[in-house]
Image (spheres, rainbow, N blue to C red):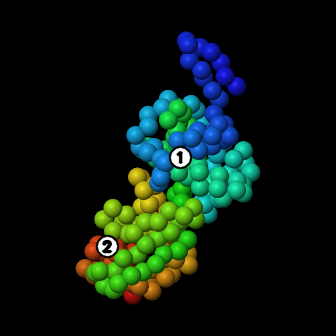
Amino acid sequence: MAKTMSGQNLVTPSAEGLAASARAAGKGRGLPPVHKWNPPFCGDLDMRIARDGTWFYLGTPIGRFGLVRLFSSILRKDGDDYFLVTPVEKVGITVDDAPFVAVDFESEGEGESQILTFETHVGDLAAAGPEHPIRVERDPETGEPSPYVLVRANLEALIDRKSFYRLVDLGVHHDGWFGVWSGGQFFPIIPSADLG
């Protein structure tokens, strides 16, 4: 629904409109340059990304992988808030934890020259290293770890349980920490002393 006000068309954001704008903006190769776009904020959209990576619109899971992939390509994080951004609009969405889930990884090499390349549930690849760090948050009450890898521009992926167990299998001790090497950098998982 559009209203004319001060010569501008104000549009109520919708998933359909965002998808159309994203398709138009993403006709080139690779991801759209959302970091360069500065459209007006158009409000919040009833869209949510659950901790398991499921995208919901109006409370219903989005079942089409192509549509989820399309929306993920125009996702941006500014501060602590998440937005879907096109050249003409910016809408807020809710993200329960991290917007992506790392569902697998490949390991090449050994020791300090090891490279761990993660794949997300929407097909992004990120080779862990200085530009794509791994971090592990621990629940202060339960001690349960939540491991993450930076995928792109402030957007992280929660590393799924099976992949985290595989990471632990590759772990080594270094400078009082147990962790993993990737891309020439050591990423701590837990203090060595806590492994008792």
Compare residues 55 and 123 and report the one nearer the observer: 123
Q: Nearer the viewer, residue 67 or 52?
A: 67
Where 79 falls versus 8 (above or below)? below
| Residue 95 - label | none
For the C terminus, the image quarter is bottom left
User: What is the residue that sits farthest to the front in this orientation?
Assistant: 28
- Report the amino acid beneath label 1: Lys
Label 2: how many Cα within 10 Å (few below 14, some 14–19, many 20+): some
| Front: mark 1 or 2 | 1
The numbered disc on residue 27 is 1
**In which quadrant is the N terminus drawn?**
top right
Q: Residue furthest top?
A: 6
User: Which residue: 43% across, 72% down?
Assistant: 117
Left or right, residue 83 beside residue 1: left
Residue at 33% over, 68% down:
129
Q: Of the residues under marks 1 and 2, which one precedes in the sequence?
A: 1
SS class, disc 2 = loop
Q: CA distance from mark 1 to mark 2?
A: 32 Å
Q: Is residue 33 above or below residue 180?
A: above
Q: Is residue 166 visible?
A: yes
Can residue 142 be seen in the rendering of this structure?
no
Kind of residue sitting beneath label 2 = Gly
| Residue 137 spot, x, y in % from top left | 44, 66
Q: Position of residue 46 (x, y in %)?
A: 66, 42
Residue wearing tag 2: 183
